[in-house]
């Protein structure tokens, strides 16, 4: 796996804190920093997600992928799956994630709660590389709800 991240500046001016990531699979992802009132020259323009937001989003995508795949392999009628992540960071550098809560919402026909819980557990204990890595610094908790459709 590889990725190249390049500073874009602000519309070619080499100010601002915009970046574009080019992934090994041929896709791009734009990131930007938050505007910084104390040091405007060091802040971003709020044109894209922050780099750590993309890390959190990637973790959500990784675990949701696992959950759907596990449920499908169990021949269950899963129709939708989402996960809302809420994270807290350390107050001092490095401001690592210290707590992450993931709330899954799954919907389908006859989707057993025990199967959803098992899929979430398998993702976090065995398959989701991202959440397993983040669990080295953060307390990761989960909850879920199942909606019958």
Image: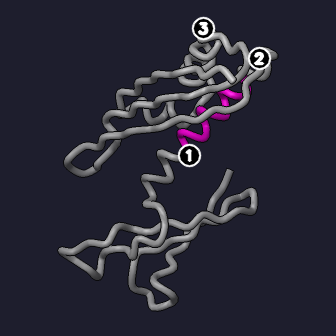
Structural distance between the alpha carbons of marks 3 and 2:
12 Å
Residue most extreme to the bottom:
13
Q: Residue at x 28, y 49 (%)?
A: 94
Q: Is mark 1 on a helix, strand or loop?
A: helix
Q: Give the range drawn in magenta.
A: 58-70
Q: Earlier in the sequence, mark 3 or mark 1?
A: 1
- 147 relative position to 108: left or right: left
Q: Where is residue 4 in the image (x, y as percent from the top left)?
A: 61, 65
Circle 1 packing at 10 Å, graded few (<14), some (14-19), many (20+), is some
Looking at the magenta stretch, what is its main secondary structure? helix
Residue 60 falls inside the magenta stretch: yes
Q: Where is residue 99 in the image (x, y as percent from the top left)?
A: 33, 33
- 35 relative position to 145: left or right: left
Q: Which residue is drawn at 46% across and 72% down?
A: 47
The residue singled out by tag 3 in the image is 114
The residue singled out by tag 1 in the image is 58
Circle 3 packing at 10 Å, graded few (<14), some (14-19), many (20+), is few
The residue singled out by tag 2 in the image is 76
Q: Which disc, if any, is residue 30? A: none
State whether residue 48 is above or below residue 111. below
Circle 2 packing at 10 Å, graded few (<14), some (14-19), many (20+), is some
Residue 71 falls inside the magenta stretch: no
């Amino acid at each position: 796996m590889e990725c190249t991240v390049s500073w874009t500046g602000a519309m070619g001016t080499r100010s601002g804190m915009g970046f574009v990531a080019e992934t090994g699979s041929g896709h791009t992802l734009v990131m930007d920093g938050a505007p910084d009132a104390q040091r405007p020259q060091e802040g971003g323009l709020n044109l894209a997600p922050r780099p750590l937001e993309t890390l959190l989003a990637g973790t959500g995508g990784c675990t949701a992928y696992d959950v759907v795949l596990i449920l499908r392999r169990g021949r269950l009628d899963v129709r939708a799956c989402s996960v809302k992540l809420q994270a807290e960071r350390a107050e001092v550098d490095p401001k690592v994630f210290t707590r992450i809560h993931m709330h899954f919402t799954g919907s389908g026909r006859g989707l057993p709660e025990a199967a959803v819980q098992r899929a979430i557990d398998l993702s976090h204990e065995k398959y989701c590389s991202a959440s397993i890595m983040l669990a080295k610094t953060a307390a990761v908790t989960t909850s879920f709800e199942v909606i019958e459709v």
